[in-house]
Amino acid sequence: MITRVQSFTFAGIEAIPVTVEAHISAGIPSFIVVGLADKAVGEARERVRCAFASLGLALPPKRILVNLVPADIPKEGSHFDLPIALALLCGMGVIPSDALEQCAALGELSLDGHINPVSGALSAAICAAEKDLSLICPAPQGQEAQWASEELPVYAAADLTQMIAHFQGRQVLSAPAPLTLHPPAPEPDLADVKGMSVGRRALEIAAAGGHSLLMIGPPGAGKSMLAARMASIMPDLDRHQILQVSRIYSLSGLLKDGQLITRPPFRDPHHSLSLPALAGGGARARPGEVSLAQHGILFLDELPEFSRACLEALRQPIETGTITVARAAHHVTYPAHFQLVAAMNPCRCGYLGDADRQCRKAPRCAEDYTARISGPLMDRMDLAVFLKPATPVELTRAAKGEASATVRQRVESARARQMARQGVINARANFEELNLTKDARSRLEQIGTKLRLSARAMTRLVRVGRTLADLADSPALEPTHLMEALAFRHR
C-alpha cells in the first residue's frame, strides 16, 4: 500500500509542491529515502524512528521506501520530517488512510515527538491556499500560516500525539489565535537631529523617490545617525509588499512570533560580510542582505571597506530589482528592490578638507581610498551629499528639527503623486513619464553635454528632479528642479 502526503520545497521565495510517498512492503528491514534528498532530509529516518519510539510505536520490520516526487528537484531542509512521519502513520494504520488526502504538512520532529518550527511556513501556506489544501504545521507557526488566507484550514500541533489524536477523532485541534498585528517597534526619530539641513533634505528626497544616497563626511559628522532615521520617514508597506517581505524573512527563519513585517526593513551589515551573505547563496542558496532589504533600506557604512566583489555585486540588483544565485544544478532568483544608502569618509584618515586636522597625505590618500568604489557603481548613486560635523554651539543651542511624522507626511504625499502618474516610484520610472517642460529639456541637454554625463546619469538626474517637483507639488519638472538635483549629483 502506498500512502501520500503533500509537502513543499522552496525555490527563491516560492514554494514548490512535493508529494511524499511511503511504501511498506515485505523484505529485508530497511528505511530508504529517495528523490534527490539532501543530508537533512536523509537524517529524517532517525528522527522519525526515535519520535515513534517515544510514543510507544515501532516501525514495522519491513522494507520502508519513502519517495519525494518530483524526483529531479533537489529537496532540502528538516521540514520533511512531519510529512514523512504522517505518511508512515497512514501506512501503519494508525491514522485513517483518507485523512490526509487534502492536507499538506511541514515541520521538524524532535526525538520526543515534539514538532519544531521550520523556515518557509508562510510561503508554504500561500501555496496550500492556492491549491485548496489544508496545512499542518508546528504550533508556534499557526498564526504565521493563517496570514496566507483566512479561509485556509490550519492544523497547528505541538507534537505527534496531538496530531494522531486529531485524525483519530479523539481530539480537535483548536484554530490558531485571531490575526492581530502588533505595533511596530519604535524607530529613531529625525527630531533628534540638530542642524544638518542639507543632510535632512537629501534624506527626504531619497525617501520620497526611492533614490540611492551616498553621504560623505569626516568621522562624527552624523552619517550613520541620519541613515538610521531614514526608515522612520518612509511610508508603511502595502499588503502586497508586506506578504513579499514577510515571505523572505520566513524563509530565512527571521519572522518572529508569527508577526508580519509592516514597516520598511533597515539592514546595516558590517563591512566584513561575505559575498553570499550580501547577494544570497551558501549551501542552501538562502536570501542575502539585498533581499532582506526588500522594499526597505540597505545601509553600507564605510563603503570603501567592503570587498570589491561585494560592491560590484550590487550593480545588477540596483538596476533590475532582482538577484539570481546560480548553481550547477539550478538557479534561484530572489527579489531585491532596495534603496542603497551608503556612508564613507572623504579619505582613509577621514579629515580631508579639515583646516585643523588636515590630511598629511592629501590628495593621494583620498584618491586611493575613493578608487575602491568603481565608476559604474558611483554612477548609480542618485544623490551624494557632503556632511560637516555640527559645532559645539549647534549641539547645545540648536532647536530640535522636524519630527519624522511630519516629514513622512510630505514623503507619502509625494509618493502618492508618483503612483497616480506612472504607477511606480520615480526611481523606477521611465524617462518619458517624468513630464519635463521644454525649458527643462534644453537645460538637461546643456548639463549632459558640459558634464559629459552618461545616459544612466542623465536619467537618474531627471528622476531626482521629478521627485523634487513632486515634493513641491509641481505638475511639471522645471529647470530649477534639475539644478537642485544637479547640486546633489556626485561629480
Image (cartoon, grey):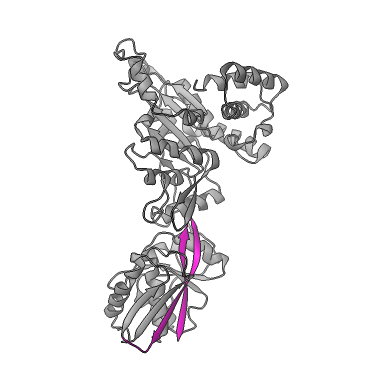
- In percent of width and height, residue 404 lies at 47, 32
- In percent of width and height, residue 254 lies at 39, 52
Looking at the image, the residue that sits furthest to the front is 328
- In percent of width and height, residue 276 lies at 38, 46
Where, by quadrant of the figure, is residue 410 drawn? top right
Where, by quadrant of the figure, is residue 473 drawn? top right
**Which residue is nearer to you in this view: 157 or 78?**
78
**Which residue is nearer to you in this view: 409 or 119?**
119
Looking at the image, the residue that sits furthest to the bottom is 26
Main SS of the magenta part reads: strand
Residue 163 in view, yes or no: no
**Which residue is nearer to you in this view: 330 or 332?**
330
Looking at the image, the residue that sits furthest to the right is 438
Q: Which residues are magenta?
A: 1-28
Q: Is residue 109 above or below residue 358?
A: below
Q: Is residue 161 left or right of residue 406?
A: left
Asked if the stretch drawn in magenta spans residue 244, the answer is: no
Q: Is residue 317 above or below residue 468?
A: below
Looking at the image, the residue that sits furthest to the top is 355
Residue 324 in view, yes or no: yes
- In percent of width and height, residue 341 lies at 45, 33
Q: Is residue 147 above or below residue 217?
A: below
Q: Is residue 83 above or below residue 360?
A: below
Residue at 39 percent of width and 85 percent of height: 24
Residue at 30 percent of width and 15 percent of height: 361
Asked if the stretch drawn in magenta spans residue 22, the answer is: yes
Q: Quick one: quadrant of the N terminus?
A: bottom left
Looking at the rendered structure, the number of numbered marks drawn on it comes to 0
